Amino acid sequence: MIDVTPLKAPFGAEVRGWEPGRALTDSEEEVLRKALHTYVLLVLRGHPRPSNEEFARLGEGFGELFGGGESYGLASDSRDVLRISNELDAEGYEVGYAGSGYLPWHTDYSFRERAAKETLLEAVVLPENGPRTHWVDMYTAYEQLDPELRERIRGLIGRHDPYASARHIPAEVLRAPQAYGQRMNPNAHLPYEDVPVPHALARVHPESGRTALYVSTFVGAVDTLSGDEAQDLVRTLLDHALRPEWTYSHEWRGGDLVVFDTVGTIHSRDNFEPDATRSMRQMSTLLPA
Ligand SMILES: [Fe+2]
């Protein structure tokens, strides 16, 4: 029996009752999809740890899987499941992606033509006291835009490139030597296509029909605008969106599995002590081509 309870937060709901060892019925999958459309983010909690296959089966209930496990140049025991982990292998390299550094506000795979529709992220090993992951509700951000600004961005196309985010990362964070790359496996890479990739700044979710502000630190340019105009616009839109009243900050507990709408949210992760170990499993579904 799937039980959905709204979080005491601007958005999100807690879900109890998922049994990884048993396939969800069609109506249970529908309950989860509807809950995600309503609450934008679901925290599945209190279930036994799923195998990779059980995790993938949950993801497939939302949509076609991206195949992150085999797309980053890292050793993987699953096509679908990407390890987000700074655990070290025998050679001293991280077994997963994303290290221990601050991850700036982004939406998953917006640097690809088919960006993520949902992402599922599960906490396997956690350091004490964090780090937290933060999400902003970009449907509300869009709805609450000043009408003139909403009119201005209508039809505009942003260009997404993960390296565009560097200008939004505070200098002291960029300077932290442990944060980026030191222990990264030399074969690891983001699954790029031809960046920068175009996506509308106001994006309609293909299932719920809701419109989200689809802007993050990955937007380095905007078609028809000069470089300066684009930077000003992105900064204005992010300043508008990044408000505590539209933000949910998750304090992870072991085994938490967060499913989030990656059209209607952007997320960031705090950095953490690089000698502490944090291991997550991640999976994304794909937007239609
Ligand atoms: Fe992400």
Image (cartoon, rainbow, N blue to C red):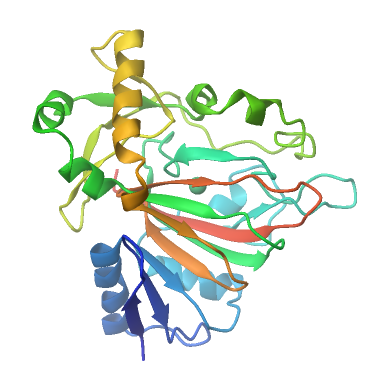
Residue 24 visible, this orientation:
yes
Q: Quadrant of residue 41?
A: bottom left
- Residue most extreme to the right: 90
Q: Measured along the vertical axis of the image, is residue 264 above or below residue 193?
A: below
Whole-percent x, y for residue 138 in the image: 29, 46
Tell me what residue is drawn at x 58 percent, y 45 percent.
Answer: 71
Determine whether, in the image, residue 12 is placed left or right of residue 18: left
- Taking depth in this image into account, of 161 and 244 the one nearest to the observer is 244
**Which percent across, then down, holds residue 283?**
51, 58
The image position of residue 130, as x and y in percent, is 63, 58
Q: Quadrant of residue 259?
A: bottom left
Q: As rendered, which of 228 and 205 lies closer to the eye? A: 228
Q: Check the image and report above or below for 51 versus 74.
A: below
Nearest to the observer: residue 79 or residue 198: 198
Where is residue 70? Give x, y as percent: 61, 50
Give the quadrant of the N terminus: bottom left
Q: Quadrant of the C terminus?
A: top left
13 on left or right of 54 = left
**In-image side of 143 versus 226 (left or right):** left
| Residue 80 visible to the viewer | no
Residue occupying the point 58% across, 84% down:
48
- Determine the residue positioned at 87% across, 46% down: 92
